[in-house]
Amino acid sequence: MAFKKTEQIWFDGAFVPWEQGNVHLLTHTLHYGLGVFEGIRCYRCDDGRSAVFRLPEHIARLYRSAKILEMEIPYPAAQLESVVIETLRVNKMAEGYIRPLVFLGDGAMGLLPSDNPVRVAVIAWPWGAYLGEEGLERGIRAKISSYTRHHPNVSMTKSKTCGQYVNSILAKREVTRMGYDEALMLDTQGMVAEASGENVFMVRDGVLKTPPLTSILEGITRDCVIRLAREKGIEVVETPITRDELYGADEVFFTGTAAEVTPVREVDDRTIGSGARGPLTKTLQSAFFDAVHGRTSKHESWLSFL
Ligand code: PPE
């Protein structure tokens, strides 16, 4: 998806012009994929202020991701939280997507990169609806990819690791080439795991179901939706889901920072429900957008104002 460049990037402790956000070709992560990142959104609230959504949770996940990969981030978490806010401010952005990236710089090559510096960048750019504005309203067409999602003992799924996304890209390319909008993936047991860059939910008889965290990313939007649903008295179950359960679902939707809450109107050519955004999806999607835009005082603790 195309992005619009902004003015400044925070890189290893200071702001540099966008054009200077470059690295050497022997950057370790470029070769082996050992790096971690986050995807965060900032929204303009109804009162005119702007707020980063669930900033401490995203930064905490960045540190957990790094810890899993034994990378030590050379800044305290509170500093990186401020840096995210500063990056939006210096770029005069009221809304947008923020990408903190932690990677191993150049130094040793090979698979024991003990002395390579851990480098940190925070980049922000405007990013619209990930799966299209129309997708948010009408729903998208998903297809289960022939590629299996990671097993925790192959490539740990709780870490938002750069290299994990090779699997996502293969899956997404495969199904978009066939004309679908997004790839769903099964885990190594054959149960529904997640989409290439989103978590998945289904509704049947008023109950909301989502796969347990076994082999998926611990999505922050997933957490929001679970909380919002429970607040509304909707039963939520974290349980293994089979692909044919999805086919028979009343509603299916994806969640993610980039994708927000996107209805799925078709899975593997089976129409889900009435083939449009389902009523519960609409309720939860509205509740999510109300929260990110500061319309509900109850969820103000999810907002870090600029
Ligand atoms: N699973 C995967 C594999 C994933 O990449 C994401 C986020 C999620 C679940 C949802 O997590 P959360 O954002 O915390 O609700 N995917 C990010 C990257 C998208 C990209 O194309 O780049 C995102 O949404 O920012």
Image (tube, rainbow, N blue to C red):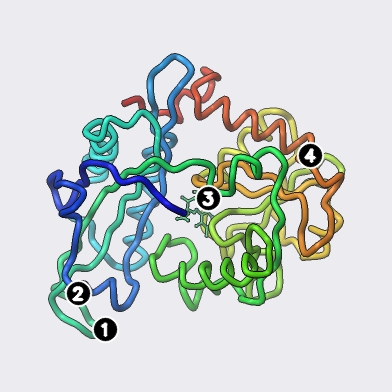
What residue is at 26 percent from the left and 64 percent from the top?
Answer: 103
What residue is at 20 percent from the left and 43 percent from the top?
Answer: 8
What residue is at 42 percent from the left and 62 percent from the top?
Answer: 159
If you read the primary sequence from the N terminus, does the residue marked by circle 1 or circle 2 appear first? 2
Disc 4 C-beta below 8 A from ligand 1? no
If you read the primary sequence from the N terminus, does the residue marked by circle 1 or circle 4 appear first? 1
Between circles 4 and 2, the one closer to the viewer is 2
- Using the image, tell me which numbered label, if any, was put on residue 25: 2
**Amino acid type, residue under disc 4 in the picture:** Gly
**Amino acid type, residue under disc 3 in the picture:** Gly
Q: CA distance from mark 2 to mark 3?
A: 32 Å
Q: CA distance from mark 3 to mark 4?
A: 22 Å
Between circles 3 and 4, the one closer to the viewer is 4
Asked which secondary structure carries label 1, the reply is: loop
Q: Quadrant of residue 57?
A: top left
Q: CA distance from mark 4 to mark 2?
A: 48 Å
Q: Is residue 81 above or below residue 35?
A: above
Asked which secondary structure carries label 4, the reply is: loop
Q: Is disc 4 surrounded by few (<14), some (14 to 19) or many (20+) residues within 10 Å?
A: many
Asked which secondary structure carries label 2, the reply is: loop
Residue position marked by numbered label 3 in the rendering: 219
If you read the primary sequence from the N terminus, does the residue marked by circle 1 or circle 3 appear first? 1
If you read the primary sequence from the N terminus, does the residue marked by circle 3 or circle 4 appear first? 3
What residue is at 49 percent from the left and 65 percent from the top?
Answer: 157
Q: Position of residue 299 (x, y in %)?
A: 51, 25
**Amino acid type, residue under disc 1 in the picture:** Leu
If you read the primary sequence from the N terminus, does the residue marked by circle 4 or circle 2 appear first? 2
Residue position marked by numbered label 1 in the rendering: 111
Q: Position of residue 196 (x, y in %)?
A: 56, 62
Q: Position of residue 254 (x, y in %)?
A: 64, 49
- Using the image, tell me which numbered label, if any, was put on residue 19: none
